[in-house]
Image (cartoon, grey):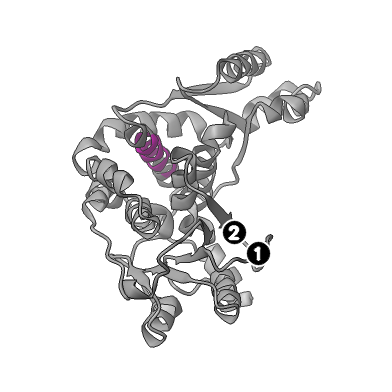
Amino acid sequence: MRDIILQFPSQFSYQPNINNREKLPVEVSAYIVGGMGGSHLSADLLKMVNKTLDIEIVSDYQFSNSLSKETLFIASSFSGNTAEVIYLLNTVLENSIPVLIVSSDGNLIKTAIENKLPYIELPDKNLQPRMALGYSLRALMKAVGDENGLKDTSDLARGLNPEIWENQGKSLAEKMRGRIPVIYSSSKNRPLAYIWKIKFNENSKIPAFYNVFPELNHNELEGWGYDLPESFLKDVFYFIFIKDNTDYEENKKRMDLTGQILANRGLSVEFLNLKGDSVWEAVFNNIILSDWTSYYLSRMYRIDSEKVDFIEKFKKML
């Protein structure tokens, strides 16, 4: 896992290629990405940064809206065997909706080749999806024709330096040992808070929770106000606030006040500022810090950060 984190910037040198490109429609008005777990995170991030892109993310067996033949469905599954994505793909094919497959292997690549469907084959099929965000983001940018995004993210191959964040991640893990993380961000940065949550879940094998401003001030904040025995809250939870200079001023104020309220109750609060020379560099610096923190927690707990045995066992039960 440590090698994977250190080598992560090299993923942004990946040049995705669309096979069977001639089968794509000439005009596309919107995009739907079907994906689960780590396979939809790139779509979350792209939607967060590229506000002009009309993109919907579906993480279920069914579509919430009616399908249009002017919409391109992107079936995203790193393994190529995700049950929900295969269900969605079958629905799309039955309705003759344009489709593009993004995967590294498995049934999806097999289906694409057999049916001459447009597809992008991701490299390094041995990675866990959550650790392949560079590959999957650039593949998705290629799929939606985001040439500016491809250019901007290619600079990350040289601009990112995971080693800079390792000690901070290790220190944060030491402070969090034995605690349940609660990650807060602005609604704009919801994908980052969610990524921190799943890195703790899958790398550290611990529960973690997230919420966003301003919504959490209208409900969840009250949940920390009950006069429980002090040791219960203090010993169980650790709060991480993701701060962004570009957030609305009112949300910055809400974040500062909420942190102050929690700290006054004796709870542990950590503020993390997004830092980078570009939007994408700031995003991935923050994600790399989540990798180091969750990795070092796994080391402290003496567990394998890469495997997801509990999830695999559940899939076999299904």
Instruction: Please tell me whether mark 1 sits on a helix, a strand or a loop.
Output: loop
As drawn, which residue projects farthest toward the front?
Answer: 27
Badges 1 and 2: C-beta atoms under 8 Å apart? yes
As drawn, which residue projects farthest toward the left?
Answer: 158
Where residue 58 is drawn, which disc sits there? 2
* Image x and y of residue 94, in percent: 59, 81
Q: Which amino acid is tagged 1?
A: Phe
For the C terminus, which image quadrant?
bottom right
Mark 1 or mark 2: whose residue is earlier in sequence: 2
Compare residues 67 and 283 and report the one nearer the observer: 67
> Within the magenta stretch, is there residue 293?
yes
Above or below residue 225? Residue 117 is: below
Mark 1 surroundings within 10 Å by alpha-carbon count, few (fewer than 14), some (14 through 19), many (20 or more)? some
Q: Which amino acid is tagged 2?
A: Val
> Within the magenta stretch, is there residue 98?
no
Asked where in the image residue 123 lies, by quadrant, the reply is bottom left
* Image x and y of residue 241, in percent: 53, 26
Number of callouts: 2
Q: What type of secondary structure mainly makes up the magenta span?
A: helix
Above or below residue 129? Residue 174 is: above
Identify the residue shown where x is 68% and y is 16%. Answer: 265
Instruction: Please tell me whether mark 2 sits on a helix, a strand or a loop.
Output: strand
Mark 2 surroundings within 10 Å by alpha-carbon count, few (fewer than 14), some (14 through 19), many (20 or more)? some
Q: Is residue 184 visible?
A: no
Magenta range:
283-294
Identify the residue shown where x is 42% and y is 59%. Answer: 129
Identify the residue shown where x is 44% and y is 76%. Answer: 108
* Image x and y of residue 311, in percent: 55, 64
